[in-house]
Amino acid sequence: MATENHAPGLATFGQNDDFWLFGYGSLIWKPPPHFDKRVPGYIEGYVRRFWQASEDHRGTPEAPGRVVTLIDRAHWETLTDHHEPTERVWGAAYHIPREKVAEVREYLDIREINGYSIQFTPFIPSSAPSTPIQTLVYIGLPSNPQFLGPQDPDELAAHILKSRGPSGENREYLFQLEEALRGLGEGARDEHVRDLVERCRGIEAKEGRKEVEGDVVGERLKKVGSTEEQEEVEK
Ligand code: BEZ
C-alpha cells in the first residue's frame, strides 16, 4: 500500500508505545538514538531512487550530491526510468520507547530541512510474526525543490563520484547503502543501487583507481566509528 500522509495523526503517533520509524537510506546503517528494537523488513508501493539532491550532507548548496528518496509506485509508473522497480523497498524499522519519542522526533526532524516530509506506511517484518506495523517514514516528495526526477544512470554515477558534503563522500553513502542492504538478506537487493555501484566501480577502474573489493568501504567504516557517527543526522 502506498503512503498516506495523516498529518493529524502525527501528534498522537507513538503515544501507545507504538512509535516505529522506517529507514531506507542512511538510517539502515546509522540508527536513530534510543531505539530498543531494530527489525529488518520491507514496505510496498514505492520505488527507491537516488533522485533527491543533497545540499546538506553529501553535497553543498553550490554542488548538491545525490541521496535516496521514495517515489510512490503509481507516480513512478508515469515516469521514464532506466531501471526496473523492485516490488519491495527493503530497510529497517526502529522502535522508539514512548519516553524518548519527543527527543527522537526533534533529532529526526532536522532531516526534513532538505525537502523530506513525514509520511506513514505499513512495514512488513521479514521474520515471523510478519504482522504489518505502521511506521513513520521521511520521503522527499516530487513536489519538494530537491526532487530531481529520473536521472541518466551513467551521469548519476559520475555525479555521485565527484560529490561530497559535510557528512563525507557521496560515493561512501552509495556504497554503504549497498552493503547495508546486503546485510538485510538476499531478497533485500535493490537493482537501482547495485547498478549504480557497478557503474561507479567501472568509472573508477577506467580512471585507474585501484580498489580491492571492500577495502575502500572497510576503511571508511572504521572512520564512521570516530567522528561521522556523531555527526548530525542525514538522509
Ligand atoms: C532514511 O531512511 O535513512 C532517511 C530517509 C530520508 C530522510 C531521513 C532518513
Image (tube, helix red, strand yellow):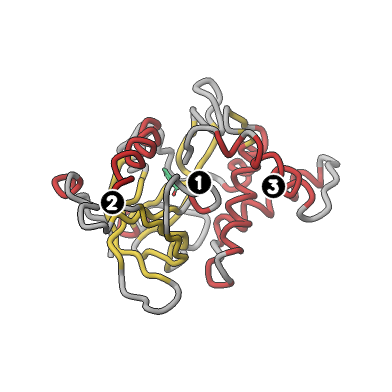
- Can you identify the residue that label 2 sits on? 98
Which label sits on residue 50? 1
Mark 2 and ligand 1: say if the CB distance to the nearest ligand atom is below 8 Å.
no
> Depth check: 192 or 83 in front?
192
Give neighbour class at mark 1: few <14, some 14-19, many 20+ (Cα, 10 Å). many
Badge 1 marks a residue whose secondary structure is: strand
The three-letter amino acid code for the residue at tag 2 is: Arg
Tag 3: residue type? Cys
Q: Name the residue that disc number 3 marks.
A: 200
The residue carrying pointer 2 sits among few (fewer than 14), some (14 to 19) or many (20 or more) residues within 10 Å by Cα, namely some
For this orientation, the residue located farthest to the top is 62
Spot occupied by residue 235 in the image (x, y as percentages of width and height):
47, 41
Q: Which residue is drawn at 58% across and 39% down?
A: 229
Q: Which of marks 1 and 3 is nearer the N terminus?
A: 1
Residue 88 versus residue 53 in the image, above or below: below
Q: Distance between the residues labelled 3 and 2?
A: 42 Å
